[in-house]
């Protein structure tokens, strides 16, 4: 591996974040004329990203109520280890209907077992940044608020680890 490749890899690893978000799950339902998405309750989204700002925006657009409760610098291996530990609790279908081998691998119900696992995460991972998207407010820019949330979370993460997120 060249120096440039090693440098790029290190920079990507510094930007990589494993996060846990409490989300308002939505499910497709037939209302007699068309398929609509309805709120069905809270659950958990566990993921990996190298762009927390963009990820916050996309989650808010999908599920409307997102609270990031834990994050740490980490690789996809870290994320996969969490999914492996929680695999028996994964939802059968994610909010967008996407599954992987019959399971929505990154989406979990808000059960005692999942909550206990999340509560057992190291305290240095913990925090809380919440965003609730109103459905129809004129002067509201969800992208700006998501950007503010991502900046606040990255700043908190950087101060706890002593480095840039």
Image (tube, rainbow, N blue to C red):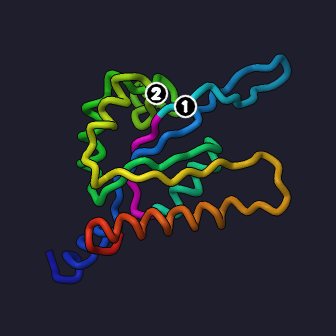
Callout 2 touching callout 1 (CB < 8 Å) = yes
Task: Look at 25% across and 47% down and name the residue there.
Answer: 122
Q: What mark, if any, has residue 42 been given in the picture?
A: 1
Classify the position of the C terminus by image quarter. bottom left
Q: Determine the image quadrant of residue 20.
A: top left
Dot 2 or dot 1, earlier in sequence? 1
**Residue 28 as seen in the image, left or right of residue 118:** right
Q: Is 54 one of the magenta-colored residues?
A: no
7 displayed left or right of 68: left
**Which quadrant is home to the N terminus?**
bottom left
* Above-or-below relation of 60 to 105: below
Q: Position of residue 89 (x, y in %)?
A: 37, 23
Which residue is at 46% across, 27% downward? 110
Task: Classify 10 Å Cα crowding around label 2: few (below 14), some (14-19), many (20 and above).
Answer: some
The label on residue 110 is 2
Q: Is residue 48 magenta?
A: yes
Q: Rounded to the nearest whole Å, what is the CA distance between mark 2 and mark 1?
A: 6 Å
Please name the residue shown 26% across and 37% down the image: 120
Q: What mark, if any, has residue 62 been given in the picture?
A: none
| Residue at the farthest left position | 1
Compared to residue 90, the image places residue 161 above or below, namely: below
Q: Main secondary structure of the magenta part?
A: strand
Examine the rendered structure and indicate whether residue 54 appears above or below residue 81.
below
Element assignment for label 2: loop
Residue at 34% in and 23% down: 113
Q: Position of residue 17 (x, y in %)?
A: 35, 58
Question: What range is drawn magenta here?
Answer: 44-51
Q: Which SS class for mark 1?
A: strand
Residue 62 in the figure: left or right of residue 121: right
């Amino acid at each position: 591996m060249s120096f440039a490749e090693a440098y790029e890899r290190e920079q990507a690893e510094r930007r990589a974040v494993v996060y846990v978000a409490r989300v308002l799950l939505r499910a497709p339902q037939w209302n007699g004329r068309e398929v609509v998405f309805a709120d069905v309750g809270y659950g958990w989204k566990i993921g990996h990203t190298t762009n927390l700002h963009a990820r916050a925006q996309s989650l808010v657009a999908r599920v409307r109520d997102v609270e990031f409760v834990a994050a740490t610098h980490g690789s996809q291996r870290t994320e996969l280890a969490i999914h492996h530990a929680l695999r028996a609790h994964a939802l059968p279908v994610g909010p967008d209907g996407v599954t992987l081998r019959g399971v929505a691998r990154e989406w979990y119900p808000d059960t005692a077992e999942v909550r206990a696992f999340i509560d057992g995460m190291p305290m240095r991972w913990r925090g809380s940044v919440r965003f609730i998207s109103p459905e129809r407010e004129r002067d509201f820019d969800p992208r700006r608020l998501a950007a503010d949330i991502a900046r606040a979370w990255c700043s908190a993460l950087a101060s706890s680890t002593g480095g840039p997120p």
